[in-house]
Amino acid sequence: KRDPLSPKNSHFPAKAKNVIFLFMTGGVSHVDTFDPKPGTETGGPTQAINTKVDHLKLAENLPLLANHAEKIAVIRGMTSTKGAHEQGNYFMHTSYAQRATIKHPTMGSWMTKLDGRFNPTLPGAVVVNGGSRHPLAGFLPSSHQPLAIGDPEAGLRNSKMHPGLNNDTFEKRLDFSQKLDESFVKKYGSAKVNSYANMYDDAIRLMKSGDLSAFDLSKETQQARESYGEDRFGQGVLLARRLVERQVRFVEVQLGGWDTHQNNFSRVPEQSAILDQALSALLADLEQRGMLEETLVVLATEFGRTPNINVNDGRDHYPKAFSCMLAGGGIKGGQIWGKTDKEGREVIDQKVEIPDLNATIAFSLGLPLDEIVYSPTRRPFTLSDKGQPITQLI
């Protein structure tokens, strides 16, 4: 019988093997980051700066990233129909509208379902700083559940054997536990019961793995840790690099604080400085290690912010137009895809909906976009719903 976690044949050649997905919760102001509009009423005080690519300008809040412009593709044509945080966040993660009756899988779980794991002893996907509302594996079995980590500097908690146990005693207790469960499993051998047993097997395999050290940031030099930024996001991005190095397929790291209804022009520079340092360090590090071509770096958010500046010197929710970014993983750098009008209000060229972005990620990974997976209630779903990949970026 074929191992469901082993790699499968895709419909087209994969460019990327792994993904580092940087999700900015709260809604990033495109006008103050990737799509600046200096000199306009909506642009505010934010100025544009030149980059290493002549036609690609970024906001002054991203000066370090400007030095890596030849590596990135900025998607300025993003648009969504979801203007509330929870719904917009869910839509970006799953390509489906949020429903009370079902929870849809996120990309990391789709990857292991459709393309297997590369490292059988480590999780196929990891989410760092993700919060309790993350959809994770959705309706897929627990074998595809991403591992959630709250503090990247704490390592993988509860992963070491209790000091009072030796391996022989541990194995005896496991054997006794299995005997206690044996009659129940025989009587109620459902998928959920079996998945619970499989979860124990995965946990034990991980505990005994030499790759467990991938979660230990103390193995990095102080210089490396400082280069990413000593905040939780920067250390999370460094952890992501360590994990994809050990063939974890998908690592998401979240950075909140972008919900700038007030004081947009002081808060966006603060958040941008955290992002700018970590993202720039990541791109340089992946390139230096020869990992950039096989690692797709995605920067995403649930929606943008209003071009209009409100009475609190802030910007409100704005799903109509916003920006995302791709790098590595076969992406052609130095590109801009999509265009907004002179005030950043409307996408006027090369509109990209959220399922299209997710389809582009999947295309880079060689995942089959048309493969149907059925939910427990036998409803058919595909990875990115009806999204179409932007193949010109790859």
Image: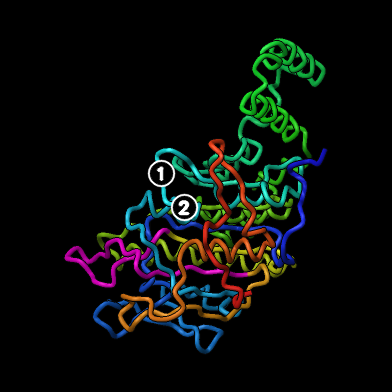
> Secondary structure of the magenta portion, mostly?
loop
Residue designated by label 2: 96
Residue 346 part of the magenta-drawn span: no
Question: In the figure, is residue 10 to the left or right of 57?
Answer: right
Residues marked 2 and 1 touching at CB (< 8 Å): yes
Q: Is residue 104 above or below residue 29?
A: above
Identify the residue position indicated by label 1 in the image: 99
Task: Give the answer, above or below, for where 320 lies relative to 220.
Answer: below
Q: Which residue, as the protein is rendered here, is positioned at the far left?
A: 311
Q: Quadrant of residue 343?
A: bottom left
Mark yes or no: residue 244 visible. Answer: yes
The image shows residue 157, relative to residue 298, as above or below, that is above
Q: Residue at x 62, y 59 (%)?
A: 369
Q: Quadrant of the N terminus?
A: top right
- Whether the magenta-drawn stretch holds residue 320 is answered as yes
Q: Position of residue 379 (x, y in %)?
A: 53, 43
Q: Which residues are magenta?
A: 302-327
Give the answer, above or below, for where 324 lies relative to 207. below
> Residue 268, image x and y in percent?
36, 65
- Residue at disc 1, secondary structure: loop
Which residue shows up at 52% across the image and 73% down it? 64
